[in-house]
Image: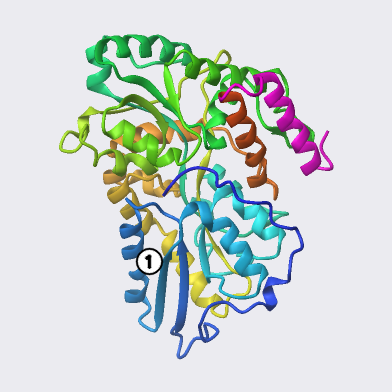
């Protein structure tokens, strides 16, 4: 799974009735003698290090239901949101099942593109799902997806580089700044890679200063409170002091390559990058050199955003019966266990954490407590659209063309245009 918020254009909120749309080829999912048949097209958004595993798992459904042909399609994360909306809104080419980022569910459901799952095979043992994971699947009292994985951010660090510089694992961003000076002095390498192209990575800094994007209960915009500007100040200071290197594009690959090759000692990342990092020269054959710690804190607290992936059925699918069964299978405890064993991704089912291979997984041991303390994002239709204003201002703040305070103010102004009933 490639993590990050896609900078997709805002799609017009003119929702076509997806139930009248035709999905990909299938025979209506009709059961013949109790057996499922037809085709289930599955759009998977996992990254290069993960997609082989997900393809194999998805095609394993055919062994349980020989009459069903699973058509696996890997769709790059950055293209998936807009591509699905275009296909669903244009009545042609949408998948039967899609792996959606947690912030997309309410948006797609609001547009009428997702089938509600209550009373279907898709929601198998829903009480077994982690409450915070299940929260991202609901919209206006109905459930539109099944949780597949849950995640959050952490500080990845190169143990040898920190040890050689004589520094402890940073607990705050001020500690990162201090450690970076010693790392530079000792090895000539940069301390931290700071994602400058992805607004999702602004959130730990915002939360660290005690802020948030919105107060959904009070329907108030809070990103332009003082904490929003302070968050930008912390990021800008890390870059200006040379404690961190940043970028304006392709940050995911740039960061991962810099970290796994040893050009930087630290990076904020998530469990989706574990397999990729372990392929680098700093960690290949030496997994123990990869350290994972809580995201550094700001002046108020340590906190990171809740992320993850859900599985949803296209409302216009011609094969809903098979699609519901496919979602049940892909979100099952057995498949989640395999996903953890092979990719170190975190399950969304509480029962899976009792399995020894999962319980003993070192990355699960760290990330599960971090997930339990992570901050839920606003589960509203506009949730994904909240990130584009941040992306625009983050770039301007980091290159010095906008002050931190003005950057936060401009985000708030953009939110007021987007969220008419917020103040």
Q: Is residue 75 above or below residue 101?
A: below
Identify the residue shown where x is 60% and y is 21%: 400
Percent from the top left, x then y, of residue 406?
Answer: 71, 22
413 relative to 291 in the view: left or right: right
Q: Is residue 150 visible in this depiction of the protein?
A: yes
| Residue occupying the far bottom of the picture | 33
Image position, residue 70 (x, y; %): 40, 74
Q: Quadrant of the C terminus?
A: top right
Viewed as shown, does residue 122 lie left or right of 66?
A: right
Q: Is residue 47 magenta?
A: no
- Taking the spot 69% from the left edge, 19% from the top edge, the residue there is 405
Secondary structure type for disc 1 = helix
Residue 146: in sight, yes or no? no
Q: Name the main secondary structure of what is drawn in magenta.
A: helix
Which residue is tagged 1? 58
Residue in the foreground of this view, choosing between 373 and 260: 260
In the image, the segment drawn in magenta is 399-423
Q: Residue at x 57, y 80 (%)?
A: 318
């Amino acid at each position: 799974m490639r993590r990050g918020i896609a900078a997709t254009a805002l799609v017009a909120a003119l929702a076509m009735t997806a139930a009248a749309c035709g999905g990909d080829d299938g025979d209506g999912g009709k059961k013949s003698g109790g057996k499922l048949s037809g085709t289930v097209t599955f759009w998977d958004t996992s990254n290069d290090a993960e997609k082989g595993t997900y393809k194999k798992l998805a095609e394993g459904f055919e062994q349980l239901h020989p009459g069903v042909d699973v058509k696996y399609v890997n769709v790059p994360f950055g293209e998936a949101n807009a591509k699905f909306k275009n296909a669903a809104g244009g009545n042609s080419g949408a998948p039967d099942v899609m792996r959606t980022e947690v912030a997309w569910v309410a948006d797609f459901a609001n547009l009428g593109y997702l089938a509600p799952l209550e009373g279907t095979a898709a929601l198998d043992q829903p009480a077994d799902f982690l409450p915070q994971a299940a929260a991202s699947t609901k919209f206006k009292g109905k459930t539109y997806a099944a949780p597949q994985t849950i995640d959050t951010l952490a500080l990845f660090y190169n143990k040898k580089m920190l040890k050689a510089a004589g520094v402890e694992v940073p607990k705050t961003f001020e500690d990162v700044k201090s450690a970076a000076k010693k790392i530079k002095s000792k090895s000539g390498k940069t301390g931290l890679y700071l994602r400058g192209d992805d607004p999702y990575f602004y959130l730990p800094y915002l939360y660290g200063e005690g802020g948030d994007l919105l107060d959904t209960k009070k329907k108030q915009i809070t990103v332009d409170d003082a904490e929003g500007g302070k968050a930008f100040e912390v990021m800008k200071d890390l870059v200006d002091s040379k404690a961190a290197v940043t970028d304006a594009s392709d940050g995911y690959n740039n960061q991962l390559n810099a970290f796994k090759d040893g050009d930087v000692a630290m990076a904020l990342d998530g469990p989706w990058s574990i397999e990729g990092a372990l392929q680098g020269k700093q960690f290949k054959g030496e997994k123990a050199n990869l350290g994972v710690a809580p995201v550094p804190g700001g002046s108020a607290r340590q906190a990171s955003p809740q992320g993850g992936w859900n599985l949803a059925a296209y409302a216009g699918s011609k094969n809903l019966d098979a699609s519901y069964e496919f979602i049940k299978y892909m979100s099952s405890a057995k498949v989640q266990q395999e996903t953890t064993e092979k990719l170190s991704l975190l399950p969304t089912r509480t029962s899976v954490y009792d399995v020894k291979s999962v319980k003993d997984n070192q990355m699960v041991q760290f990330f599960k407590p971090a997930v339990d303390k992570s901050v839920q994002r606003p589960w509203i239709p506009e949730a994904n659209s909240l990130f584009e204003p941040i992306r625009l201002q983050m770039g301007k703040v980091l290159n010095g063309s906008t002050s931190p305070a003005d950057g936060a103010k401009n985000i708030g102004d953009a939110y007021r245009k987007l969220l008419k009933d917020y103040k």
